Image (tube, rainbow, N blue to C red):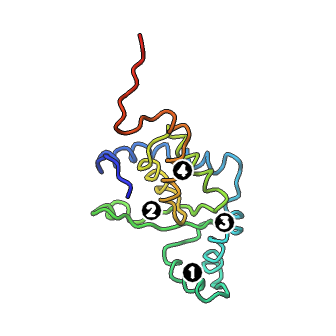
């Protein structure tokens, strides 16, 4: 279980403040190298069955995968040929303000690029803040654990950030 001593109100304020920068971050990550998201999603083994089902109703030959695709398709949509995940807010009354968050589905090839971009371009925040930024615009299966492992293994964070329970190092005058 991952826990951090950050209050929900502080997290909400931080993410609201960062939402202004979020669109710029998402664009710079995904458009910096002119990624063709539609093409990469169609090549991705995870996205392909959903795109095919939402486009023309075709299902995979494997019966288990076909059932899974039909069930999952309720929370996915295609917009201009790009696959999005539709997430309903979990907090009370937040669904009155933001009924559904549309998250772009990140293909397998771009997961590490997006994680690195979100974590690095926002000043190497901890896991919670990185994950909240990421889930506000992007989605993939196991995003939570991938984000946790990425932040834990970030070399810059390991070098700079202080370990809990260790006193701060003193610098001589």
Q: Which residue is mark 3?
A: 41
The circle drawn on residue 150 is 4
Q: Which residue is mark 2?
A: 101
- Nearest the camera: 125 or 42? 125
Task: Indicate the secondary structure of the residue bearing disc 2.
Answer: strand
Q: Which of pointers 2 and 4 lies earlier in the amino acid sequence?
A: 2
Residue 154 at x, y percent in the picture: 54, 43
Question: Does the residue at mark 4 contact the one at mark 3 (Cβ under 8 Å)?
Answer: no
Q: Which residue is mark 1?
A: 69
For the residues labelled 4 and 3, the Cα–Cα distance comes to 22 Å
For the residues labelled 3 and 1, the Cα–Cα distance comes to 15 Å
Residue 141 at x, y percent in the picture: 53, 66
Residue 19 at x, y percent in the picture: 45, 47
Q: Which of pointers 3 and 2 lies earlier in the amino acid sequence?
A: 3
Question: Does the residue at mark 2 contact the one at mark 1 (Cβ under 8 Å)?
Answer: no
Closer mark to the observer between disc 2 and disc 1:
1
- Nearest the camera: 21 or 140? 140
Q: Residue shown at 49%/43% (left/top)?
A: 21
Q: Which of pointers 4 and 1 lies earlier in the amino acid sequence?
A: 1
């Amino acid at each position: 279980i991952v826990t951090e001593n950050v209050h929900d109100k502080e997290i909400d304020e931080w993410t609201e403040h960062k939402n202004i920068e979020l669109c710029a971050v998402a664009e710079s990550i995904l458009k910096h190298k002119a990624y063709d998201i539609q093409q990469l999603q169609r090549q991705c083994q995870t996205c392909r069955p959903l795109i095919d089902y939402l486009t023309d109703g075709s299902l995979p030959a494997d019966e288990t995968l076909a059932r899974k695709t039909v069930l999952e398709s309720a929370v996915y949509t295609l917009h201009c040929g790009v696959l999005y995940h539709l997430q309903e807010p979990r907090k009370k009354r937040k669904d009155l303000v933001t009924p559904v968050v549309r998250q772009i589905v990140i293909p397998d090839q771009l997961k590490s690029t997006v994680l690195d971009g979100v974590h690095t371009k926002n000043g190497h925040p901890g896991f919670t803040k990185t994950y909240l930024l990421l889930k506000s615009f992007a989605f993939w299966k196991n995003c939570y654990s991938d984000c946790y492992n990425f932040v834990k293994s970030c070399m810059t964070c390991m070098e700079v950030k202080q370990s809990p329970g260790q006193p701060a190092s003193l610098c001589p005058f």
